[in-house]
Every structure is written in C-alpha cells, then in structure tokens.
Amino acid sequence: MLIATLLLLTSTLQPEAIGGYAGGCLKNGMALPLTGPGYQVIRTKRLRYYGHPELIHYLEGLASQTKMAGLPDLYIADLAMARGGPFSSGHRSHQTGLDADIWFRMANRPISRWEQDAPKEWALIDEPSYRTLPGRFGPQQLTLLRLAAQSPDVTRIFINPVLKAEVCKRAPSEPWVQKLRPWVGHYSHFHVRLRCPIGSPDCLPQAPIPPGNGCGAELASWLKDKPQLPKTSTIYSKLPQLPGRCEG
Ligand SMILES: [Zn+2]
C-alpha cells in the first residue's frame, strides 16, 4: 500500500513535456529564478519563465558558462507558462517547456525594475536592407551561440538567416553550426529548443535536422527574398489541437 502510494506520488510529481512544441503542455514544470549568476529574466510580468527542469538547468548552466567566458549577463526572455500551452500573443511554440528565447544583447549591469518590464529591443539587423547593423554581431554573440548550441540537449536553435550567414562566414566548419536553423523574425534574439527529455513518453520530437552545416543552398534560399512574418491573425486562426492529457 505504502509503495503504491509512493509510486503514485512520484508519478504525479514527475515533470513531463506533453505533445508537440507548437501544440502541447507542461506538467510539473519549474520557474527559472528571475536572476542568477550570469543572467537576468526580462518581461517577468508575462509569467513566461517556467520550463521543464531540463530547460531550467540548461539555462542556468549556459549562463554560468558565458559568465566564465567573460560575457556580460544574458537577457532571458520567454520560456513557457507554468503549465505550458499556447501563448495569447507572440510565438506559436514554447508550449512544452523546452523552448527559450535569449537576447543577443547582454547586460553589463543589474537592470532596473522598469527596464526589466520594458527592455529596449536591440535589433541586429537593418530591416529595409536586410543586413546586419555594424558592430552588433561580434565575438561575444558568436561565443554565446557556440556555448548555447554545443549542449547535446539542444536539437535546434532558430536564428534569423542574415545572422546564420554571419556565423557561416566566421565558423563554417564547427559542428554546432548545423543546429542553427534559419527562421523568420528573430532580429534581436535566438530561440533554443531542447530535445524531448527522458521520462516524457508523450513528448513529440521533431524530425532530425538535415545533414551538413546548412550554409550553402539552404541558407541561400532563405536569403534570396526577405522572408515575411505571417500576420498574427493567420498564426492564431488555426490553433492546434492539444493532446487529451493537456485538458483540465
Ligand atoms: Zn522563441
């Protein structure tokens, strides 16, 4: 009886990512502390700083690595809501507690309360010309991407194609470059995605990424015409069906 109760208790407390990255939820997630060595969470009023414990540990580990590498504090933006699921605004994924947005801009000082709620976006790309703004993608940003992508838990990093082209110029033969996936938007941040954790049997993995560093024809096709962000109304007109386990 006692063993059965204990088993039930452990299974009810087991953290789980359920469903797909863009149609799922999070069970027994945890909050990322709002500040820690090497990072600060921004826009905390949105309450999107929850994740699967593997994501929380990954972010804390990354921030300590970047700090050791001499980088200023990271700005951590959206993770997931406490129980995952679709956001009311913004991006479609981030639903299972395995996605996180990290800014390229870094903070070399503690930020004020006001700044934390409304930090200034710091685009790295000039939209009309679709080129990098001078001086904004430097060695620190490259180091940050390298440390973020090298973890075996990371399956993909979504990044603007213009910035992937910068990485392809500077570090084309480094194996982690393969994980950088061009995507629309992302002028000021990149988006890290972790693989399905062990103990999440209903987590839906994404197809493996194609072989090669993606610096050739694939990237060229993204750069040919500036990709347009879909209008918000089209993003939200088709909300995904959530897995049954996410109800209630
Ligand atoms: Zn994102």
Image: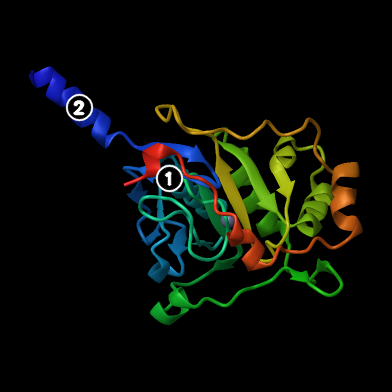
Label 2 close to label 1 by CB (< 8 Å): no
Query: Which residue is the extreme one toward the left?
Result: 1
Compared with 8, 128 (above or below) is below
Of residues 73 and 103, which is closer to you in this image? Answer: 103
Q: Find numbered disc 2 in the image and state the secondary structure of the residue it sits on.
A: helix
Tag of residue 138: none
Tag of residue 8: 2
Q: Residue at x 77, y 52 (%)?
A: 164
User: Could you tell me which quadrant the N terminus lies in?
Assistant: top left
Would residue 216 be seen by someone viewing this image from the given angle? Answer: no
Of residues 156 and 60, which is closer to you in this image? Answer: 156
Question: What is the quadrant of residue 152 in the picture?
Answer: top right
Q: Residues within 10 Å of mark 2 (few under 14, many from 20)?
A: few
Compared with 9, 140 (above or below) is below
Earlier along the polypeptide chain: callout 2 or callout 1?
2
Q: Residues within 10 Å of mark 1 (few under 14, many from 20)?
A: many
Compared with 65, 201 (above or below) is above
Q: Amino acid at mark 1?
A: Cys
Residue 221 location (% of width, % of height): 89, 50
Q: Residue at x 30, y 33 (%)?
A: 14
Q: Find numbered disc 1 in the image and state the secondary structure of the residue it sits on.
A: strand
Tag of residue 25: 1
Of residues 96 and 167, which is closer to you in this image? Answer: 96
